Every structure is written in structure tokens, then in C-alpha cells.
């Protein structure tokens, strides 16, 4: 029965309700069936905030290493812990739904603060684990630790010339410059009225 559902899910439609796996236990069961069906499993994980071309290229490249791409997405709370109080810009539900529309993403699971970075890796035991060279919380020592849970670990270079963090900084800088200009003009106008 689960095999029939999997074939339907992989049929090309968004199928968000079926492709978003709500808990790790359910994901473990799904992965067991996928492996029995002979699929090569690829796993990657991240925030995917302000989805951009680099994310899409990264996920396409990740999928090229196997048959099924499972993406662990950091929850809002986990993202705040990792990236700071102003992140994420896009809430987790929207990030998950946007990723479900990308043709290379087969299954999604939410990583919560209770999950360590290795929990998903140990659960899925992917044939291929994809990590970005720009990921700061996955040092080479960790790669050695997780090697026992993966067939292969592939480090991909960044797939775009910008990052979400860089875009957010640009938005903040532009906003601050505009605000400073407006304050400067208001101050100038006030002083002119005051000096009359």
C-alpha cells in the first residue's frame, strides 16, 4: 500500500500533504520502503530562507546523485538559534510549500530544536549525504563521524553568487540608508522652520 502511495507521490504533482513527512518515525518507515524498492536515497538539510536560484541549483545538483531527494528543513525556532533573532524571513510553512514545488525535491521533513544535526542523517542513513561547502556547522570532523551512516558524503560548492544572508544585509542597508536620508531631510526642514 505504501509503495502505491509512493508511486503516486513521485508522479509529478506537488502532493504537498503526502511529500511533507510530519515526523521522524514516519520518515523512517518511508525510507525503509524506498530502499526495499531499490531507490538510491540522497539527503540534504538547511534553512532555505528567501528561496533563490542558488537553492534550486543546489537541490538539482543534489538530486543528480541519486533517485530520491529528502530535504530536512530547519524550523523557525531552529533557524533563530542558528542564524539569529531576525531569521527566518519566510515562515517554515511557506518555505516547506515552496520547496515542494521544486521538481527535484521528493520528500520534506522539518528539523526541530530537539533534533541534533546528526539525527536525520542517522535515521535516513542515505546512500549520499549532500552538504554545502559554505555550511559552517558541518566541519570535516563531523563528516568523518557521519561517514558510518552514509554511503558517500558529497560537498557541493555554493550554486549562486549571493546568499540569503547577503540579500538580507543588502535589504537592511538599503532600508537604513533610506531612513537616514528621510531623517536628514526632516531635520533639515525642521531647522529651516525653527530658524525663521
Image (tube, grey):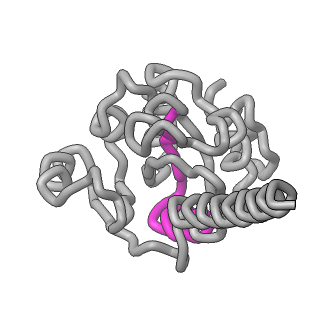
Where residue 38 sits: x, y (%)?
Answer: 47, 49
What residue is at 72 percent from the left and 66 percent from the top? 181
Whether residue 29 can be seen here = yes
Q: Which residues are magenta?
A: 55-75
Whether residue 7 can be seen here = no
Where residue 144 sits: x, y (%)?
Answer: 13, 54
Q: Is residue 32 left or right of residue 104?
A: left
Where residue 98 sits: x, y (%)?
Answer: 72, 48
Does residue 136 belong to the magenta stretch? Answer: no
Whether 61 is drawn above or below 107: the answer is: below
Q: Quadrant of the N terminus?
A: top right
Where residue 155 sits: x, y (%)?
Answer: 33, 67
What residue is at 57 percent from the left and 42 percent from the top? 88
Q: Is residue 139 left or right of residue 61?
A: left
The quadrant in which residue 96 appears is: top right
Q: Quadrant of the C terminus?
A: bottom right
Does residue 74 belong to the magenta stretch? Answer: yes
What residue is at 62 percent from the left and 35 percent from the top? 92
Q: Is residue 50 left or right of residue 196?
A: left
Whether 146 is drawn above or below 65: the answer is: above
Q: How many marks?
A: 0
Query: Which residue lies most toward the front here?
Result: 196
* Of 92 and 187, the residue lying toward us: 187
Whether 43 is drawn above or below 25: the answer is: below
What residue is at 65 percent from the left and 54 percent from the top? 50
Whether 161 is drawn above or below 177: the answer is: below
The quadrant in which residue 168 appears is: bottom right
Amino acid at each position: 500500500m505504501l509503495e502505491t502511495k509512493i508511486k503516486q507521490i513521485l508522479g509529478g504533482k506537488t502532493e504537498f500533504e503526502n511529500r511533507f513527512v510530519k515526523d521522524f518515525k514516519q520518515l523512517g518507515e518511508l525510507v525503509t520502503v524506498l530502499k526495499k524498492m531499490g531507490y538510491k536515497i540522497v539527503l540534504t538539510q538547511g534553512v532555505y530562507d528567501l528561496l533563490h536560484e542558488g537553492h534550486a541549483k543546489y537541490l538539482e545538483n543534489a538530486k543528480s546523485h541519486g533517485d530520491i531527494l529528502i530535504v530536512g528543513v530547519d524550523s523557525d525556532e531552529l533557524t533563530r538559534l542558528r542564524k539569529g533573532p531576525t531569521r527566518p524571513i519566510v515562515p517554515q510553512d511557506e518555505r516547506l510549500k515552496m520547496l515542494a514545488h521544486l521538481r527535484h525535491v521528493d520528500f520534506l521533513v522539518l528539523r526541530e530544536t530537539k533534533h541534533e544535526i546528526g539525527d536525520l542523517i542517522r535515521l535516513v542513513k542515505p546512500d549520499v549525504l549532500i552538504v554545502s561547502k559554505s555550511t559552517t556547522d558541518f566541519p570535516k570532523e563531523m563528516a568523518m563521524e557521519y561517514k558510518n551512516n552514509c554511503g558517500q558524503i558529497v560537498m557541493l560548492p555554493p550554486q549562486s553568487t549571493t546568499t540569503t544572508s547577503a540579500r538580507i544585509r543588502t535589504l537592511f542597508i538599503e532600508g537604513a540608508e533610506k531612513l537616514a536620508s528621510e531623517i536628514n531631510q526632516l531635520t533639515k526642514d525642521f531647522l529651516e522652520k525653527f530658524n525663521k
